[in-house]
Amino acid sequence: MALVQQNPIVTTAAAKLFQLPNGVQYTTVTIYNGSASPIYVGGSSVATSGATKGATIAAASSLVICLNANDALWAIAGSATSAGDVVVLFSGI
């Protein structure tokens, strides 16, 4: 296996942050938010507030979550992040 790093930009519309590849077993994923504002992660209906508010990743903080093959995580922000602000790390195939 090899370390996979992705640097997605999180915008003000819910979008797929990343998806684990097929064949990856239960694995730990670290998401670092280096932007000045929080981002919110969850399912495809994730929002910044209300009934579908996602898990908050505060500015300069990380979230560690365990996922399985083909699991996808979606994200949204109150203000868009810049290139390189968000880092996703996991062990891939």
Image (cartoon, helix red, strand yellow):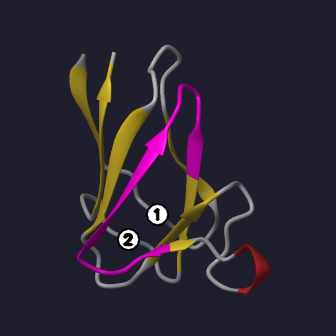
Residue type at mark 1? Val
- Name the residue at 60% across, 71% down: 54
Residue placed most toward the observer, 72 or 27: 27
Q: Is residue 62 magenta?
A: yes
- Name the residue at 50% across, 39% down: 67
Quadrant into which the C terminus falls: top left
Q: Position of residue 35 (x, y in %)?
A: 29, 75
For the residues labelled 1 and 2, say whether their Cβ atoms are less than 8 Å apart. yes
Q: Which mark is residue 78?
A: none
* Location of mark 1 (residue): 10
Q: Residues within 10 Å of mark 1 (few under 14, many from 20)?
A: many
Q: Is residue 29 above or below residue 19?
A: below
User: Magenta segment, which residues?
Assistant: 56-73
Residue placed most toward the observer, 27 or 80: 27
Q: Is residue 3 above or below residue 72?
A: above
Mark sitting earlier along the chain (1/2): 1
Kindly report the secondary structure that dominates the magenta region of the rendered protein: strand
> Which residue of the protein is positioned furthest toward the right in this rendering?
51
* Location of mark 2 (residue): 81
- Label 1 residue SS: loop
Q: Is residue 55 magenta?
A: no
- Name the residue at 31% across, 51% down: 30
Q: Position of residue 82 (x, y in %)?
A: 32, 67
- Name the residue at 44% across, 20% down: 24
